[in-house]
Image (cartoon, grey):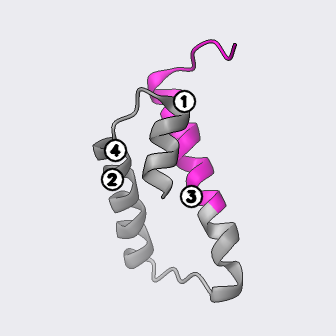
Amino acid sequence: MIKSQIAFWHGTVEKRHIDKMLKNFQFVADTYDFVIHKEHEKRAIVAIAANITLWAASKFGVGKVF
């Protein structure tokens, strides 16, 4: 869900780039034993999507909005 939505929003980001970012997040979470509790799951999804979207904007730039 996150991969397809961010690729759609940005347009120039390939899903393989997003896969790499998610794998990096997973590595950090495993290394530091981060756990997302059920009651915080939705907030975590939004935070992860926002971080990847900001990364995409900084890496690939932002085109005209309209």
Identify which residue is drawn at 65% across, 59% down: 46
Residue wearing tag 1: 57
The foreground one among 45 and 29 is 45
Residue wearing tag 3: 48
The CA span between labels 3 and 1 is: 14 Å
What range of the chain is rendered magenta? 46-66
Sequence order check, earlier mark of 3 and 1: 3
Q: Is residue 41 above or below residue 18?
A: below
Residue 5: % across, % down: 52, 47
The CA span between labels 1 and 4 is: 15 Å
The CA span between labels 4 and 2 is: 6 Å
Residue wearing tag 4: 15
Which-is-in-front pick, marks 4 and 3?
A: 4
* Quadrant in which residue 65 is drawn: top right
The foreground one among 25 and 11 is 11
**For numbered disc 1, what is the local secondary structure?**
helix
Kind of residue sitting beneath label 1:
Ala
* Neighbourhood count class around disc 4 (C-alpha, 10 Å): few under 14, some 14–19, many 20 upward: some
Residue 42: % across, % down: 67, 71
